[in-house]
Image (cartoon, grey):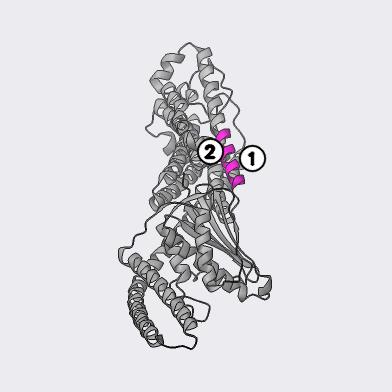
Amino acid sequence: MLILLSVCLVLASFIIFAVKRNQEAFLLLGLCISLGLEICGVMIFIAKKGGISEDILLFLYFSRDILNRIRYLGITLNQLGFLIALGRTLFPLFFAEISLHYSMIEWVRKNRWIKYAAMVFPATNLILYYPQVYRMITEKRPGLQNLITEGSHGWLTAYLVVGGLLLLYEYKSITMKFCKRQFGQITACILAMAILYLLYYQQDPGQVYRFYSMDFIWPRGIGYLQINPGLVSYIGLVGIMLVCTVMGFYSLFKYTTGMFEEHKEDMVMQRKFNMAKVGASMFVHGIKNQLLASRVVHKRLRSLCEGEKADIEKIRENIDVLEELNSSMLERMDELYRCVKTNAIYMAPLEVQEIFHEAVERFHRKYPEEMVECIVPGAITVLADKAQLCEALSNLLINAQDAVNESADPHRGKIALKCYNERLYTVIEVEDNGKGMTREQVKKIFEPFYSSKNSNHNWGMGLYFAREVVKGHLGFMKVETKPQVGSRFFIMLPRYN
């Protein structure tokens, strides 16, 4: 039963690795494989050790036939001992490495040598527990044998404690709900596997190498002369493992499902945009021709005004305003067409305050009387295309104001534009206390040409454009919303140092 559960956990980690294929997935795969090696080695050792009652035998191995097949496997004590040594040694290493990988503590992030230094004890441990080396250095040296046993147990425990504390500290330090939820899922899986490991890690490989030896009293593990636990103890042991495994599977499933859904959503959006790009190109071309024609009309109006005496200055002022607006629209159309045509953005280090100022100015072109509260704690720099990111932010601000206007009490509406650092990301947040959205609406808001507003004036490209711009900046967007309460849009950009 225990072997079957550990194999299932390894298979689940292979699925994660096949989906994600990055350092994080590799470390998780190593964690599961090393745990599987440890459990399989201990279960084979128990089968070969014998001396267990019939009811415990059936509980652990289902039948005597399966027990005999495991007991008479063609594996020597040296091979079995080193199998246990591999799983026992590598699990704390992968556990520590994945904890360091997730940690956002500045000292840990800057000193990358820590990850390499963490390999020293495991490498030394595997050398010492290599069968021939272990037998040679511990032969008739019980003091050295005891030192290796206690020292090994000490660093294994230290790695588990430090790794666990790093994970818990990181989880506690996360403030964003969806980040905390996602990190909590993977943390629950890792800690569940650590609990499984704790049930067996005191099994010293030397105990397997010296299976028939009576010159050393083993203080830990499953000893040859020790009293075997009863059926109730084994039921409790397996019960704990089942709970931990279910937790691990659930967390892995949620984590993988989340990644798959995001990937699937991106594929759907891309297919829709393949058609949207054609429409957008035609739209840009048509509007540009209309604007050029409008410019000709402006010139004709100016020529007709020549020689007029009544309100001539006022007419010219209005013409100047229209011409300036026309030029601005042409520039924006050229910019949009450039992005559609080349599918490229040009990024440079920019102060967030500068981006906020430009975005709010664009917002005020539509809502000149409305206020936006900007909150930026200190100087924060991001790597961004100023024009693209400002346009995306202004779209979010305009949507926020539209939501406020449609709320029950628009006069009490409030819009906030915030920026702060969260783990590996710089977060730009747009918050409003407008009408909010339902779950059904949230599923569609990033689709091109979807709009819950008047379709004659709102074409439903603002949020889609903003999402694509953020993806072009190697970031992603999230939204939290509640009907009649408000919405919060999060732009997650890679942190720039």
Q: Position of residue 363 (x, y in %)?
A: 53, 68
Q: Is residue 327 magenta?
A: no
Q: Is residue 347 above or below residue 81?
A: below
Q: Which numbered marker is on residue 106?
A: 2
Q: Residue at the spot x=56%, y=25% of the render?
A: 154
Q: Quadrant of residue 283?
A: bottom left
Contact? badges 1 and 2 (CB < 8 Å) = no
Residue furthest toward the top?
140
In the rendering, which numbered label is found on residue 50? Answer: none
Percent x, y of residue 278: 32, 74
Report how many numbered discs are placed on residues in the image: 2
> Quick one: label 1 or label 2, which is nearer the N terminus?
2
Please name whichever residue, 138 or 192, is drawn nearer the observer in this view of the structure: 192
Up-down relation of residue 165 to residue 311 (above or below):
above
The amino acid marked with disc number 1 is Val
Name the residue nearer the viewer: 489 or 13: 489
Q: Position of residue 23 (x, y in %)?
A: 41, 43
- In terms of secondary structure, where does tag 2 sit? helix
The residues colored magenta run 161-174
Locate residue 417, reporting x and y percent: 58, 60
- From this viewpoint, is residue 226 visible? yes
Q: Is residue 199 visible?
A: no
Distance (Cα) linking label 1 and label 2: 47 Å
Q: Residues within 10 Å of mark 1 (few under 14, many from 20)?
A: few
Task: State whether residue 454 is above or below residue 222.
Answer: below
Name the amino acid, label 2. Answer: Glu
Q: Nearer the viewer, residue 249 or 73?
A: 249
Assess whether residue 164 is covered by the magenta stretch: yes
Label number found at residue 232? 1
